[in-house]
Image: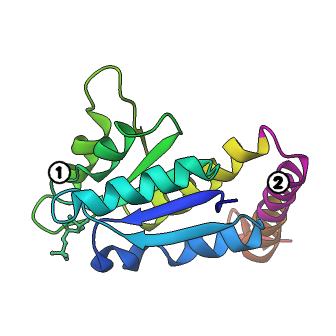
Amino acid sequence: MSNEVLVLLGSASDMKITEKGLDLLKKLDTSFQLRVASAHRTPDHVYELVKDFDANGGKVILCVAGKSAHLAGVVASMTLKPVLGIPVFTPETAGFDALLSMCQMPGGIPVGTMGIGSAGFSNACLHAVSIISLSCKERLKNLSEYRSYMKDTVIQSDLKNRQNFVRGEALA
Ligand code: RP5
């Protein structure tokens, strides 16, 4: 039995955007394996990891990569499992190179592309749990509790920060 989620990083330097998302996977009780494998530098290793994950019943693959980011597309060509791509920011192009490399896939081999950087990776983790929750009631419950927690946090923040200032007078 494999982990449910495989997180592939194109380089260890991509680790910087993963902290919050990995915490979410842990919080939502979702098993994952994180590996570093590059579509350009170690294509054979990418192939082995994907085939092994597939053969062992893994569910969703997250590919984090920057620059001319072919990892997600190459992985998507090797599996029928859902593949989500997360572009990493690079100063030269603000991450648009990786974003376009992932979202402009030729028709037929989809990569579900998230936003650039840490928020994109967190959303990819939540989306992976959402996909898993289609066939897992406990995971659906975890996700629903997380939504309620976020809602409460915003409501608390409103109570703490609200201001009401009318014609020179602060009202309660
Ligand atoms: C990509 O090139 C990696 O995903 C990384 O974002 C970028 C730079 O890699 P390093 O030179 O830092 O290893 O393949």
Residue 167 left/right relative to 38: right
In the rendered view, would you say 107 is above or below 92?
above
Q: Disc count in the image?
A: 2
Q: From this viewpoint, which residue is outermost toward the left?
A: 92
Which residue is denoted by mark 2 in the rendering? 139
Give the image location of residue 55, x and y in percent.
56, 48
Please, what secondary structure does the residue beneath circle 1 have?
A: helix
Does 141 lie within the magenta span?
A: yes
**Above-or-below relation of 23 to 164:** below
Residue found at x 84% / y 46%: 136
Q: Which of the 4 image quarters holds residue 21?
A: bottom right
Q: Is residue 74 left or right of residue 156?
A: left
Q: Kindly state the secondary structure of the residue where label 2 is placed.
A: helix
Badge 1: how crowded within 10 Å, few (<14), some, or many (20+)?
A: some
> For this rendering, which residue is in front, 27 or 56?
56
Segment colored magenta: 134-150
Q: Which mark is residue 97?
A: 1
The earlier-in-sequence mark between 1 and 2 is: 1
Callout 2 amino acid: Arg
Give residue 3's position: percent from left, percent from top: 64, 62
